[in-house]
Image (cartoon, rainbow, N blue to C red):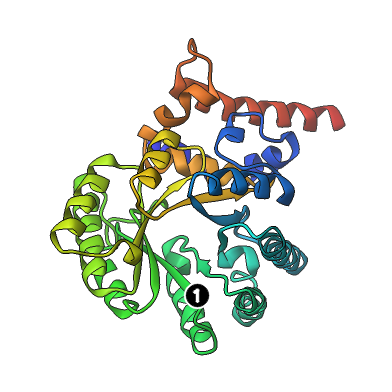
Amino acid sequence: MLKDLFMGLSQNQFLNSAAKKYGLKLGAQSVVAGTNIEEAIQSIKELNAHGISCTVDNLGEFVFKNEEAIAAKEQILKVIEAIHDNQVDAHISLKPTQLGLDIDYNFCVDNVREIVDRASQYNMFINIDMEDFKHLQPTFDLLDELSLEYDNVGTVIQAYFHNALEYLEKYQNFRIRLVKGAYKEPEEIAYQDKKEIDANYIKLIEWHLLNGKFTSIATHDHRIISHVKEFVKKHNIPHDKFEFQMLYGFRKEFQLKLASEGFNFCTYVPFGNDWYGYFMRRLAERPQNLNLVAKQVFNKKTNTVIGVAAGAFILGRITKSQKKKRK
């Protein structure tokens, strides 16, 4: 029930727009690395100091206006320059819908190509994030097209899809981030049960560790991480073949511990004003995430579940009140 609640909130355009206006006031400041490039770079420097690399996400998705897509492209290009100028250990994660995939495929290709080309000049990797099923094949098409020209691109495989292994086999020679999946998909194409998703996730990780180019294992689940540790030890898989990934602000001590143990570790660093959908999906995809940020987001007397849901409700009420006053 909680997953459906937060997923519904993440897709509410009214609340997304309101969140941009009212800023990071519902606790998201603990899991979003600021609203501008300068703040993001400072966060990256702090993580780098602990031996942690970063992948940077300029927050935003599902764009339907050309000028917004172009503005997002220009912002990402500025991030690339900032990463290069500050000589920090970071690369880019981008969402095709932010760059015009829902407007025109070729328009999106041109935007992403410009980003990939700029990054290639600095030997910087670009990860093309996966979104919902509707955009799955167009995103693979985008990767196919760009990989004919560039070798600094990769993508994400979501374990909740029934045919995830088929995708992984096709793209085994790419750098791949493996995730469980954060969007609400129908049971005809995606597993709904957590145990089934976890089992498929482990199967994908093991397969790509043995057969793939480079594996980014994106999870906060300590049981899966422990399983991976034993698996790579058993099969003598070198550490330069994989990395663990977690989201900025989640399980900070665990992130530092893994990095100190000598594992490659990468933190997913989101920044910007368009934080609401991202934040709500993080709460939807894994209820435990509520507890992971509770101490930073709420005081000790606040019930976490009620706090987040109430925060979303309050944001809606505030915005509705403002609209009434203008009438």
**Residue 3 x/y as whole percent:** 39, 39
Question: Dividing the picture into quarters, in which one does residue 190 lie?
Answer: bottom left
Q: Amino acid at mark 1?
A: Val
**Residue 181 x/y as whole percent:** 37, 54
Residue sitting at x 67%, y 45%: 42
- Quadrant where the C terminus sits is top right
Residue that carries the numbered disc 1 in the rendered image: 153
Q: Is residue 327 visible?
A: no
Above or below 10: residue 122: below
In this picture, residue 319 sits left or right of residue 275: right
Residue 132 or residue 267, whichever sits in front: 267
Above or below 167: residue 270: above
Q: Is residue 209 visible?
A: yes
Residue 221 or residue 214, whichever sits in front: 214
Residue 251 or residue 3, whichever sits in front: 251
Residue sitting at x 62%, y 34%: 29
Above or below 122: residue 217: above
**Residue 65 x/y as whole percent:** 72, 65
